[in-house]
Amino acid sequence: MIRLAAIDTIIPAKMDAALMYIHSQFGYSVESIFRELVVQSHVDLGEYPNTFPYTISDYYWIQEGEARVRPWVAIGKLKTGVYFYYVANCNDPSGRFYLNKKATGIMHLWISHRYSDLINWAMDADVYKKYLSETSATILLEGVARMETSDASQSEKSDQM
């Protein structure tokens, strides 16, 4: 089971500016922003309107972006049961991804049957650190570390007897 960030930190509206331009008329069709994972078998992207972002069922983590400062980032699940990881950068100071009939940013979308593949193969190191610090994934890692420490302590006690 995937553990989510604190529910009050997931505000889908934080992604509106980056998601509203996903359409071929703006130069950001789902097909053009999709990046295939090397470890992933074929994933059906669907067709408008039954495709990303209209089929998002759950957000697991969101980073609100700011034009020219930091990207908009989201990871979650689609209604089809697959997971998505989406990153959008905007170069226009106003935060618009499309201006004067020209794209002013870049978007990437990864879709996978396995959540872990998105974390391992799509996320860069800086985003990964922030994701860990803001989600309960840190709790999971701390729990594993405690278990390993506990196992080592048990092993030392057995050796002493």
Image (tube, rainbow, N blue to C red):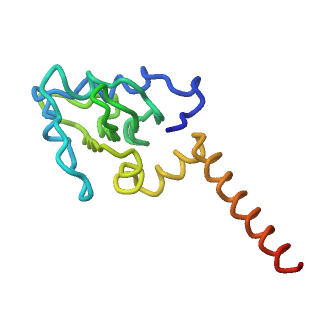
Determine which quarter of the picture holds residue 135.
top right
Left or right placement of residue 9 versus residue 77 in this view:
right
Q: Residue furthest right?
A: 161
Q: Residue furthest bottom?
A: 160
Left or right placement of residue 11 versus residue 28 in this view:
right
- Could you say where residue 103 lies in the image, as x and y percent from the top left? 18, 35
Q: How many numbered badges does the structure rendering display?
A: 0
Which residue is nearer to you in this view: 100 or 122? 122
Determine which quarter of the picture holds residue 80.
top left
- Could you say where residue 21 lies in the image, as x and y percent from the top left? 23, 26
Which residue is nearer to you in this view: 123 or 25? 123
- Could you say where residue 89 lies in the image, as x and y percent from the top left? 32, 41
**Quadrant for the C terminus in the image:** bottom right
Determine which quarter of the picture holds residue 107.
top left
Tell me the residue at 25%/39% (across/down): 105
Left or right placement of residue 159 versus residue 71 in this view:
right
Tell me the residue at 69%/63% (across/down): 148
Q: Is residue 52 shown above or below 158? A: above
Q: Is residue 32 shown above or below 128? A: above
Q: Is residue 3 shown above or below 14? A: below
Tell me the residue at 27%/41% (across/down): 109
Tell me the residue at 57%/45% (across/down): 137
Which residue is nearer to you in this view: 132 or 19? 132
Q: Residue furthest front?
A: 161
- Could you say where residue 139 lies in the image, as x and y percent from the top left? 65, 45
